[in-house]
Image (spheres, grey):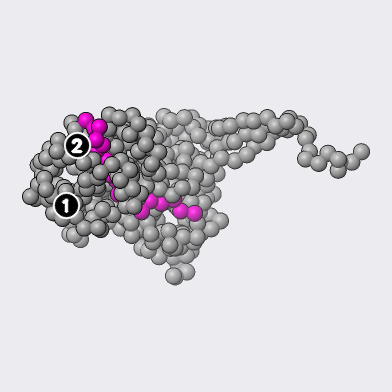
Amino acid sequence: MSSDVRGYVRELAERAREAQRAIAALEPQERRQLIEGMAAQLRQQGAAVLAANAGDMARAREAGLAPAQLDRLMLDAARLESMAVALEEVAAQPDPLGEVTRRDRRPNGIVIERQRVPLGLIAMIYEARPNVTADAAALCVKAGNAVVLRGGSEARASNAAIAACLHAALREHGLPEAAVSLVADASREHVLELLQLTGLVDLAIPRGGEGLIRFVAEHARVPVIKHYKGVCHLYVDAAADPVKALDLLVDGKASRPGVCNALETLLVHRDIVPVFMPLALEVLANRGVEVRGCARTRTWGDAVRPAEEADYAAEFLDLILAVRVVDSLAEALAHIQRYGSDHTEVIATEDAAASDAFIAGTRSSAVMVNASSRFNDGGQLGLGAEIGISTTRLHAYGPMGAESLTIERFVVRGDGQVRHPESMAG
């Protein structure tokens, strides 16, 4: 790695870390106004952002990017407005900094508090999703952090245009632009250097395909929050309402197949197969979904392709669904334990005992009972936006909002208490 690369990335991180102090020192209302200003700038400069994105999309099509990647890259007026609204929702949330989550008084009279403080400097490494530029900046600022953003080369112009909006808001409020820093060069060399900056970078969050996330996890010397893929299941229980289950299936698989909270596998209890399976196969065919099923599934439809072992572990990110008939809830849970990715699991059932057993038997970051897998999203779960979804069991699990970008420390309040009074003078 050249000294120029090392110097550029280190200087960027050092300036961002210095700027973080200014963000953390703001009053809650000032941070709110700053993020609202970012949303306003996105709207004011929306034409420039969409023009930059149109150029990125043209280059991506010429390069042969997959449909799922193109979908993540694309911005239009509606998506741009959703970005601005997400920032406003983040701004309106309670400020997490300084929150005392617990307070206890010990027998010796000292009072022990748990208090939320910023993590510090976040390195955000992502692909194809230009909305992450705005979401990550707003969430980091809300939690008193600075952020170094490294987007993918396919979204370079879009990310730069969005960053210009964020920088304009920072300038308006007399704050350093370095608090939201964008790595101009998307090469892997810059990522590698960023991941080595122990003492500067407090946390790295990769967001993208499995290849990117594994690259970050394998090369980082700083802590990493990650999820490799989303192999999400819908289990249709014997006591399911077939109409509800069909709605969950269609929304989970066909509404936007190229995202990590889309369904990839359908498990159907044998007792409801005669009612549910013909309806499911018909509705899937009508929406262009290719079904790969077990032997029992294939008896219900000539168009069903044989499922291979690898299909049940696959994140298709496409209109492809693996289907399996199971004999029991226990068998469904065993399948999920073997093939799942700890992302999102869904049960369709009218039996409260079955739903409780499903919740207890899965370890995913989100469990849905008669609700679509597509709700595993920061905005949908009330976070305003998300910086990513963690399936790493560290301080955060599931969609990460502003609160997940803080950490709790101990604050001890006393009145002169000492641990060893017998050793005191006099």
Q: Earlier in the sequence, mark 2 or mark 1?
A: 2
- Amino acid type, mark 1: Ala
Residue 174 visible, this angle: no
Quarter residue 117 falls in: top right
Q: Residue at x 47, y 69 (%)?
A: 3
Query: What residue span does the magenta drawing correspond to?
Result: 223-241
Assign a secondary structure to mark 1: helix
Which secondary structure dominates the residues rendered in magenta? Answer: loop
Quadrant that contains the C terminus: top right
Position in image of residue 155 (x %, y %): 29, 53
181 vs 344, left or right, is right
Quadrant that contains the N terminus: bottom left
Position in image of residue 239 (x %, y %): 25, 32
Mark 1 highlights which residue?
295
Q: Residue at x 19, y 51 (%)?
A: 294
98 vs 2, left or right, is right
Decide: is 9 above or below 19.
Answer: below
Q: Residue at x 26, y 53 (%)?
A: 312
The one of 402 and 369 positioned closer to us in this rendering: 369
Q: Which label number is shown at residue 194?
A: none
Mark 2 highlights which residue?
272
- Amino acid type, mark 2: Ile
